Amino acid sequence: MSERKSRRWTADELSLLRRLVFDEKPLSANAAVLNRTVLAVRTKAAHERLKVRDDSSPGPQGSGGDR
């Protein structure tokens, strides 16, 4: 069985994660900027008690659907 290779989060990465979450960037965008998997970013955000926006979540303008 292969061993999982994980990188520790640096202080700079944590700071950037907090900024991205504060700016309400979607989870996949955060992962791309941080060069991490979506799961890694979601897990770290939860550990840091940060509320991330899933890609399926509506943005600040709402769902954008017409009624």
Image (spheres, grey):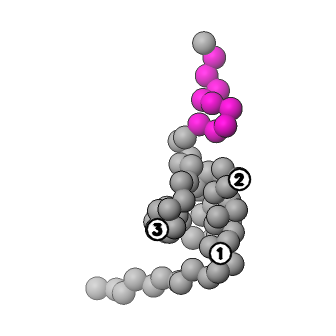
- Nearest to N terminus: mark 2 or mark 3: 2
Which residue position is annotated with label 1?
13
Percent position of residue 6, x then y: 48, 82
Are dots 2 and 3 in contact, CB under 8 Å? no
Left or right side of 25 for 1: left
Q: Which amino acid does label 2 sit on?
A: Asp
Are dots 2 and 1 in contact, CB under 8 Å? no
Q: Which residue lies furthest to the left in this view?
A: 1
Above or below — where is 54 with respect to 5?
A: above
Q: Which amino acid does label 1 sit on?
A: Glu
User: Mark 1 to mark 3: distance in Å?
Assistant: 14 Å
Left or right side of 32 for 38: left
Query: Are there few (<14), some (14-19), or many (20+) residues within 10 Å of tag 3?
Result: few
Which residue position is annotated with label 2?
23
- Nearest to N terminus: mark 2 or mark 1: 1
Percent position of residue 64, x then y: 64, 26
Q: Give the range drawn in magenta.
A: 58-66
> Mark 3: which secondary structure?
helix
Q: Is residue 59 magenta?
A: yes
Which residue is at 68% across, 32% downward?
61
Percent position of residue 34, x then y: 64, 70
Q: Which residue lies furthest to the front in this view?
A: 49
> Mark 2: which secondary structure?
loop
Q: Is residue 65 visible?
A: yes
